[in-house]
Structure formats: C-alpha cells, structure tokens
Image (tube, coloured by chain):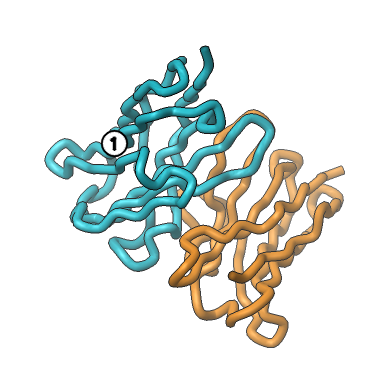
Chain colours: A orange, B cyan
Amino acid sequence: NFMLTQPHSVSESPGKTVTISCTRSSGSIASNYVQWYQQRPGSSPTTVIYEDDQRPSGVPERFSGSIDRSSNSASLTISGLKTEDEADYYCQSYDSSNPWVFGGGTKLTVL
Amino acid sequence: EVQVLESGGGLVQPGGSLRLSCAASGFTFSNYAMNWVRQAPGKGLEWVSAVSGGGGSTYYADSVKGHFTISRDNSKNTLYLQMNSLRAEDTAIYYCAKSSCSTSCYSVIDYWGLGTLVTVSS
C-alpha cells in the first residue's frame, strides 16, 4: 500500500499563485492517474483536476495539475487566487490493489 | 452538461435496508464506470463501490463487501446501491460519482452529485 502526503495547510493572497503538493510514498507517481478534489465546508466535493492534468468542463483555466517523476509527486497550481478558492483540496490516486488512496487534505486560506 | 442526481436516502433502523438511486444525464452513460463514495459526519471521503460501464464488473470496499450491492440500468441511465444489514457506521452522505474511464481506472472521478444522506439509527 502507498500513501499520499499533502501539506496540512497553505495560505496566499488574492491574485497570487499557490501550489499544493501530493507526494506518493512508494511506486511511481506516473503509474496511475492523480485527481484533485475541492470541498468547501458543507458542500459536496468537486473535481478540479483528473487524470493528472485534465480539467472537467466548468473548471477555470486558473487550475492546473502536473506530476514530477523526480520528486514522485503531483501538484495542483491555482493562479489568480480568488476568495472563492478557499476550500480543502484532496489528492487521490489508486493502484491495482487499492482503488482509492486519498491524501490527508490541504486547507487553502485566501487572505 | 454532465449531471448526476442521487435519491433514496433517509432514516433507517439498524439492520434495515435502503436502495439509493442516481440519475445521470449529459453523457453516454454506458461508456463510463460509476462510483459511490460516502462521507461520514465530520470525516473524510471513503470510496464505497464501483461498476464498469457495461455493468459486468463490480468493485467494493472491504467495509461494505457482502452487504452492499451496486448495479446499473443503462437503458434508464441510472445507478443503484442496494444497502442491506445497515449499521450505525454506515451513516453518511452518499455521493454518486462518474468516472472518466470505462473499466480499469474506475475510481478516477470527474463529476460528482450533491449527495443523499443516509442515517442509520434506532
């Protein structure tokens, strides 16, 4: 079994750019797709990135995803931060024996 | 526009049964795997079950194996979750979620529903 590790919290000012990392403990980050889910308090989750770098329809281009084989991690980058981006962000991946491996979540504060 | 809409949640006694439904629209339903993911009060997301696009393959979390059954009716664009022998720890919001894949990467979710609350209590 592998784990996904995220920073507990990040904060940045409106209009700036923030990057949230998600590090895979074992096995290659490139072996299986990584997804990023946004969840605001009291709301259902939404997908902002799937299949490493794909945005669902309706997600602004300000959201982008990437993977880095050298650090075995995935990243979610949000540019032009808005107060509405304040939420918890979770990375998720899988492998052949674990259909759902979830990061611990990162609380993004836009202040 | 992709939409998935859950229904069927409610209050049920321990040991009881409930069937959740999820009506899908805005995409070719039979081409994609579908998932149920739940979230207990104040807890994180927990994947529950998935079914392949054609319905021939099903997958379950160990916590629900043997007492939940996932199915789909592609003629009605509807996903189901039959929940039997319900326990207090099954209390959660249940989300229907569309996969971006048909089979192998079924837990890659691109769209979520708003959820339906299931409360198991006497």
B77 shown above or below B62 = above
- The quadrant in which residue B109 appears is bottom left
Q: Is residue B115 above or below residue B107?
A: above
Task: Please state the chain letter of the residue tagged with numbered disc 1 in the rendered image.
Answer: B
Residue A74 falls left or right of residue A45: right
Whole-percent x and y of residue A21? Answer: 73, 66
Which one is in front, B22 or A15?
B22
Disc 1 on helix, strand or loop? strand
Image side of residue A27 versus residue B103, left or right: right
Residue A80, horizontal then vertical, whole percent: 73, 54
Towards the viewer: A56 or B20 = B20
Crowd rating for badge 1 (residues with CA inside 10 Å; few <14, some 14–19, many 20+): many
- The residue shown at (35%, 30%) is B84
Q: Above or below — where is A59 with respect to B106?
A: above
Which residue is at a point 67% across and 80% down the rendered structure image?
Answer: A72
User: Residue extending furthest bottom?
Assistant: A70
Question: x and y percent of residue B72 in the render?
Answer: 22, 42
| Res. A1 visible in picture | yes
What amino acid is at disc 1?
Tyr
Q: Please state the horizontal and vertical placement of residue B102, each as a whole percent of the image.
A: 29, 61
In the image shown, does B94 or A40 lie closer to the viewer? B94
Determine the image quadrant of residue A96: bottom left
Residue B98 visible to an observer of this rendering = no
| Residue that sits furthest to the top in the current view | B122
In the image, taking residue A64 as reference, residue B108 lies left or right, namely left
Residue at 64 percent of width and 43 percent of height: B44
Work out which quarter of the rendered image holds the N terminus of chain B and state it.
Answer: top left
- Residue B2 as seen in the image, left or right of residue A21: left
Residue hosting label 1: B80
